[in-house]
Amino acid sequence: MELYSSKPTFMQQGAPAFVGREAVNNAYSDIFTLLKLNVGFDIKEVKKLGDNTALVRTHSNGTAYFKPSKTTRNEGSNELFILNLENDQWKIDNYIFSADHR
């Protein structure tokens, strides 16, 4: 959570938006209780949108291990991060991703 802003939003495919630090933290706790990710990120674009805002677009690729079923599958997503400058540090303010199963 140290990477996130003071009022973040996390949006994953097929789920409602998680708004606020507590909601984002709970979403991550739920996700990583069920799976373990082994992915790498390829940064596709970094764009400063103003003095205090930036956009980062990435693609991730790797595997996801599902703990309950003990199964693994290929995992890939397109991600979009909106960063805000808080206390002289870039923080993730908005994060959205969608699965990319090629």
Image (spheres, helix red, strand yellow):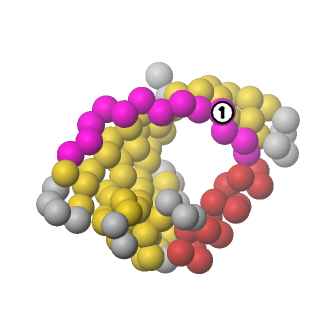
Vertical order, 5 against 14 (above or below): below
Region in magenta: 35-47
Q: At x 41% / y 60%, what residue is drawn? A: 92
Q: Is residue 21 left or right of residue 58?
A: right
In percent of width and height, residue 47 lies at 21, 46
Instruction: Report the residue marked by disc 1.
Output: 38
Q: At x 35% / y 71%, what residue is drawn? A: 86
Q: Image quarter for residue 95?
A: bottom left
Seen as rendered, the residue at the extreme front is 88
Q: Is residue 101 magenta?
A: no
In percent of width and height, residue 58 lies at 38, 37
Vertical order, 41 against 30 (above or below): above
Q: Is residue 43 magenta?
A: yes
Seen from the viewer's position, the closer of residues 94 and 70 is 94
Q: At x 49% / y 54%, what residue is drawn? A: 12
Seen from the viewer's position, the closer of residues 8 and 89 is 89
In percent of width and height, residue 26 lies at 65, 69
Q: At x 14% / y 60%, what residue is drawn? A: 50
In percent of width and height, residue 57 lies at 32, 41
Q: Amino acid at mark 1?
A: Asn
